[in-house]
Image (spheres, rainbow, N blue to C red):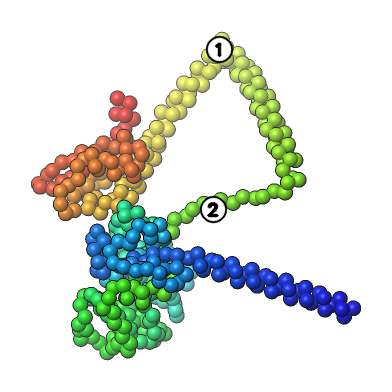
Amino acid sequence: MNRIMDVEKEVALATAAAAQTASGRKRWFGASSREELLLRPASPGLPDEGAGLCWLQRRHGETQASGRGLPPSQHRRLPVTLVLQGADASLFDVVAPPGLKAQEYALLLEEQLLSDPETQQIVKLGQAEGRLQLLACDKSLLHSWQSWLAEQGFKLTRVLFDLQLMPPVPGSVLGWQGPANLLLLKAADKESAGGFLSWPGNQLPALPEKWAVQSWREYSDEVDELEALAPGSSAATSLLKPTRQAKASGIKLPTGLRRPLQLTAVAALAYLLATGAFQWREQQAANQLLAQRLGLGSSTDLEQVQRQLTRQLRMQQLPLQQLSETEGLTIALSDWLAQHPQWRLQRLGNSIETGFHASLIWQGEGETPALEQIRESWSAQLPESQRVNMALEILDGKARLQLSQLMDAEVQS
């Protein structure tokens, strides 16, 4: 009996050891396959054709290559994490009720933001003692970087800010001196709220005592600074919303079950075809009976009446269909303006009688794009571009773009 128990114990230990080895091997392969490209601009603001850009190519937490400017083509297949300057973000520490959802964060910042909260991308960095630490930045800035990187052949997967990657110490202030900017980061604790200050240069102005710096980090090289920030990127919250992709899932059936299931499927199809034929014959008989009761000569006359009723029903539903189309155009215009911030919406109308119409004014630098270029960008956003009439005019030295929906009568003509 003791011998049997010893054998069972040895088998159990061997099984546990094999499972632990397999788990460790899985974790090791998962870590080794993690490879990414970190990009960071040297100054705040919109992308400037790669000027001042530096980059790191990392594999399972180790830097493999680095440089300035645009990375070589062999690195552009990697998922990209963009690390922006803290001067382009705003950090808030606010009192928040429990159970607040992410889409409700903007309600907490309505009185503190200088712009419309709907134009801001807001994420939670942390929470403590009934308070939330929220980071906000302009959505148009994210769209500009995403579009520019896509044009250069990069796949942007995450957007972070440098202040998220700095190692704060609770109850103290961290001073971070980069090549061109100076940033002070104060960690939140039970006694006080957190925050940060940022300005160009390296001269520290006179500040209140609570902003006295206890720890300094200085970097004179952009690549060295990015390498110091890189370790904190893995756990940081991205401001770029992830795209949802449907996961393909398949079920592998045992060989012995495939044949019976195939025969069952064929039988079900034959049953559906027989049922459909029976219902069609019943419908024909019902049509003939209804035609006799209505005094019509045959079921053919009844079909004509049905077509007329169907046509009238479509005419009644046409206003609702037009209103649905105008709502779709309004949503498409909002997306188009997010990708072309040089245009500003001046007037927007939407009704059943006149359809969708909008007026935009050009506020960008340089010459106004040609009307054909505008049509091409709109067509890429909305395939049904032929249902929108565009007119470009110059009034008082300013370019205005007039958009109006082509109603059904105009389309048919």
Q: Mark 2 vs mark 1: which is more N-terminal? A: 2
Mark carried by residue 395: none
Task: Using the image as rendered, state which of residue 14 and residue 400 is in the foreground.
Answer: 14
Taking the spot 67% from the left edge, 70% from the top edge, the residue there is 19
Where residue 57 sits, quadrant-wise, is bottom left
Mark carried by residue 247: 2
Number of numbered callouts drawn: 2
Dot in front, 2 or 1: 2
Task: Using the image as rendered, state which of residue 160 and residue 343 is in the foreground.
Answer: 160
The x, y position of residue 236, in whole percent, is 42, 71
The x, y position of residue 206, in whole percent, is 20, 86
Q: Which residue is mark 1?
A: 296
| Outermost residue to the top | 297
What's the amino acid at mark 2?
A: Lys
Viewport quadrant of the N terminus: bottom right
The x, y position of residue 53, in whole percent, is 28, 65
Q: What's the distance in space between the residues labelled 2 and 1, CA to CA?
A: 56 Å
